[in-house]
Amino acid sequence: MSLANIASAKAQPSLLARLFARQELALFVCLVLVLVFFSVTVENFFSVRNMTNVLGQASLALTAGIGCAIVFISGEVDISIGSLLATIALPLIIIMNDTNSLLLGVGGALLFGLIIGVVNGYLTAYAGINSLIVTLGTMFIMRGGVYLYTGQRAIPDNTSLDSFIALSDGRLFNVIPYSAVIAIVLLAAFGYMMQHRPFGRQIYAVGGNQEVARLAGYDVRRVKFICFIISALLATVAGIILAARVGSAQHTAGLNFEFQVVAATVLGGVSLAGGIGSLTGMALGVLILQFLSNGLRGLGLPTEWQLVITGMIIIAAVAFDEAKRRRANGG
Amino acid sequence: MSELTHASAPKRFIGGQLLGSSQLVLGVILAVLCIAISIAAPQFYSEANIIAILRQCALVLIVASGMTMLIITAEVDLSVGASLAFVGCIGMAVLNSTHSLALGMLAALAFAGGVGLFNGLVVTRLRVNSLIATIGTMMMLQGGVYLFTREAVQNHNQLASFTDLGAGYAGPVPVPVILAALIFVVAYVTLRFTTLGRYLYAVGANEKAVRLSGIRSERLKLFAFIVTGLCVGVAGMILSSLMNAGQPTAGRGFELTVIAAVILGGTSLLGGRGSLFGTLLGVLVLKVIDNGIIILGWNQDLQMVVPGIVIILATYLDIIRNRANVR
């Protein structure tokens, strides 16, 4: 038993590296299978129009998922992002209605998002409160705050700025929705940071083993603090896209959004325990779920079935992944 | 480090083991709340209002009793809200077709217990993280309840015993409060005074050690999941009796209220630490706040904001108090 442990511990780095590669490959194969299945069964599924549409729909979860994955990798959780979506739409729409400027509105929204990130990050990293509790709390506070402020009514955008509408309807080269472009650019930038910049490595180190990271001279608290700010800012971007799509600040915006993102992130192989996973995996997880729900709708299945099937797939995928990991570790 | 903890050990004894850990903070918060609200609104202490608060507490406390056990074993169940709605619909449908409270209750308990069993098996056998597993179950139940019924299942049975389940009284005390008290006491005794209870703590604190000492940790976790499910079954029937219908939309966000109450009561999400007495205090604090907001005539949307602040604040105060103790 102990010998086997030592042996597996020694072989671990390369084994883990190979495991990552295989994990993303497996996810990719899943995505292809989903695409092939629905291309055969659903008319017009495999069309440029539908593919890019789904990409546009996925942009919300992709953008917020980056932050979610980064916080997971640092060993914490952030479930306040759904409420954040509704919260930052308020300054966005109100400032836009007042000033008729998208830039000022976005600036106001990002500032709001920054403050929320600082609060979440400070309470978790510096005050030392469990992040699930912190973000559960701020989730309640923000949702309640939005209800209070709006009296549970939507605040419509009165400006009809072209640039704002373009965020939801515009397409780059008339093909790819701008929202998807934003998501892909952010994904590439943060993917680069996570894999090739020292800060990315610090995040993995902190999530992998906090004590070791501290002894290696990393400022664990600062790393976690920044991760929460990143998460809040990315969720803010998602919230801006959502507000553009519905053309208003909706008090119910983003209800259950956090669960969808968490599910997609975990499906993508990002471990809740911290230190494991990649943004590529997260993105594949989001795309699988999004194409799946699009395809099921194409088959004429009601939304309820989509929920049921999504739930089953999440459980099955994580269970499968877990079984594979155990076998690989010889357990 | 170990010296420090040794030094603080006697202090803890003086502090009183009965009100150990976070419960002292919570008790003070509850007292301050009650005093503040009653100064602003004297009707707070009326018999009718106290009964109203207790009735509000009952539903949450029933599910929180199971959830406390589950969180002590270091697992969590997010599907209880969705399950609550589903159970209400199924229970009502069975009551309507059989006109038997016993069969309706049985169906509700079987379904909710089945959900708990499913969650437990997925977590213990398939090794899926319980947060994810129960998000999955939550989605399946939310979708499933709409496949079962698109509209509320109305009460066509007019069984007096079923109406009493939610709205009835035994003397001055509402029936749901009695049920909640019963479940609470059983759970309390189990956790505090039985070997089973001690094992539940042990599993949460150090699962490996428990397994190495020959105890089947999976079975203990499975047990906690099923108990939580059964609690949801009871709560779902009470809720559908109170609403006089099985509502597929009921229970949205209920899981968060329950978990908030348990956490507020000082039960650690990491497992191994916590108590049902703390959970009771947590439920009371949340519901007294709800009630205070109503009788003070404040905007009811504050019922989301204030608990959020209280959860964070109480946890923070607990951390500060622990730090002071260690010093």
Image (spheres, coloured by chain):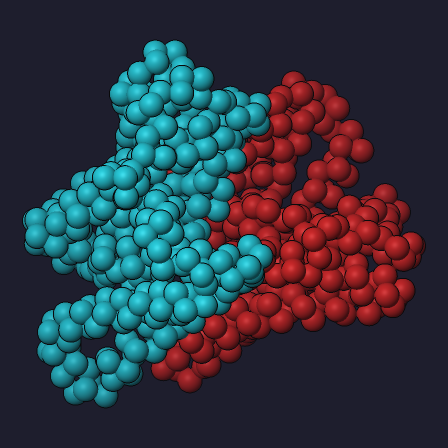
Chain colours: A cyan, B red
Does any portion of residue A221 appear in the rendered image? no
Of residue A102 and residue B15, the one placed in the foreground of this image is: A102
Tell me residue A71's x, y (percent).
28, 48
- In the picture as drawn, the residue positioned furthest to the top comes out as A99
For the point 88% across and 55% down, the residue is B156
Name the one closer to the observer, B125 or B12. B125
At horizontal 72% and vertical 65% (from top left) the residue drawn is B108
- Residue at 45 percent of width and 63 percent of height: A42
Residue A162, given in percent of the width and then of the height, sits at 33, 23
Q: Position of residue B146 (x, y in %)?
A: 65, 56
Q: In the figure, is residue A304 to the left or right of A226?
A: right
Camera-side residue of A258 and B229: A258
The quarter in which the N terminus of chain A is drawn is bottom left
Q: Is residue B322 left or right of residue B83?
A: left
User: Height in image: B97 above or below B323?
Assistant: below
Q: Is residue A279 visible?
A: yes
Total marks drawn?
Answer: 0
Q: In which quarter of the view is residue B235 placed?
A: bottom right
- The x, y position of residue B17, in whole percent, is 49, 52
The quadrant holding residue A227 is top left
Residue at horizontal 23 percent and vertical 66 percent from the top: A24
